Image (cartoon, helix red, strand yellow):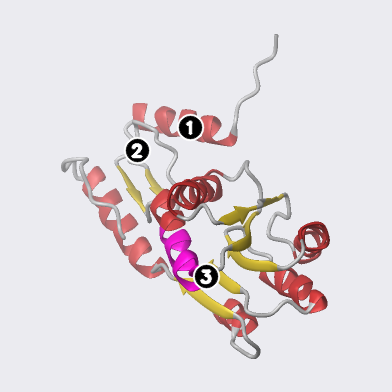
Amino acid sequence: MAHRFTVKQIAAQAVESLAARGVPVVTFATDIGADGRIAYVGIDKAAAGRTAAFLLSRFLGERGGVVLPNLGSRGFHGENDRWRGFADFMASRYPRAAVVTIDGGYGLYHATYELARAERSARGLIAGIYSIGGGNRGLLRALDESVDRDVVFVGHDSIMRTTACCAPGGSMRWSITTSKPMLYVRSDICCVSAGMAGLPRAMPAAQ
């Protein structure tokens, strides 16, 4: 019987192979849990999801409603970790919200728009969106066409395009949690240099 491996498993095997040959490996932005890596540089994805859930619940307050976390794909390990942290927080700390996951847009404009439009048609008014997997313009187009108002939008990475499409022009409330990519790069270089010099493997992850 043929075995099917996930991307995470294949990447972990590659890291172990490199480590066995003495090549220092640092995982960047998304961890894969391989024992052979000398460090992971990036944020705690599950904690990022919990933070997004906390922000969204504070904005929504007592009214609750339908909340759409938007995943590019459950096959994307880092996005799935964010979704898990978000869903766990909402289930335990904010049960008044009805969490309906959008999955499969792959961060693409049209695919994400079609998924969001279908859920809006099926569920009625949308109270909040957690954009994990991109496709923000598609999400907002679906909301604009349905004339939803007072929607809470929480996303990641305050790049110019994301900020522009979420800029308050109506009654949408939004929050962008940011990361520091240049800090990650500097930390990567430090970790690899330490590994090549034979220094201890216990290196802190950039937050």
Looking at the rendered structure, the kind of residue marked 2 is: Arg
Looking at the rendered structure, the kind of residue marked 1 is: Ala
What secondary structure is the magenta-colored segment mainly?
helix
The residue beneath circle 2 is 37
Q: Is residue 57 magenta?
A: yes
Q: What segment carries the magenta color?
A: 51-62
**Residue 168, image x and y in percent?**
59, 88
Which residue corresponds to the image point at 39% horizontal and 33% vertical from the top-left?
A: 34
Which residue corresponds to the image point at 61% horizontal and 65% vertical from the top-left?
A: 129
Instruction: Examine the image and state in which quarter residue 182 appears.
Output: bottom left
Estimate the spatial distance between the alpha carbons at disc 2 and disc 1, rounded to whole Å: 10 Å
The residue beneath circle 3 is 60
Q: Which mark is residue 14?
A: 1
Instruction: Examine the image and state in which quarter residue 110 appears.
Output: bottom right
Q: Is residue 207 visible?
A: yes
Which quadrant does the N terminus fall into? Answer: top right
Estimate the spatial distance between the alpha carbons at disc 3 and disc 1, rounded to whole Å: 44 Å
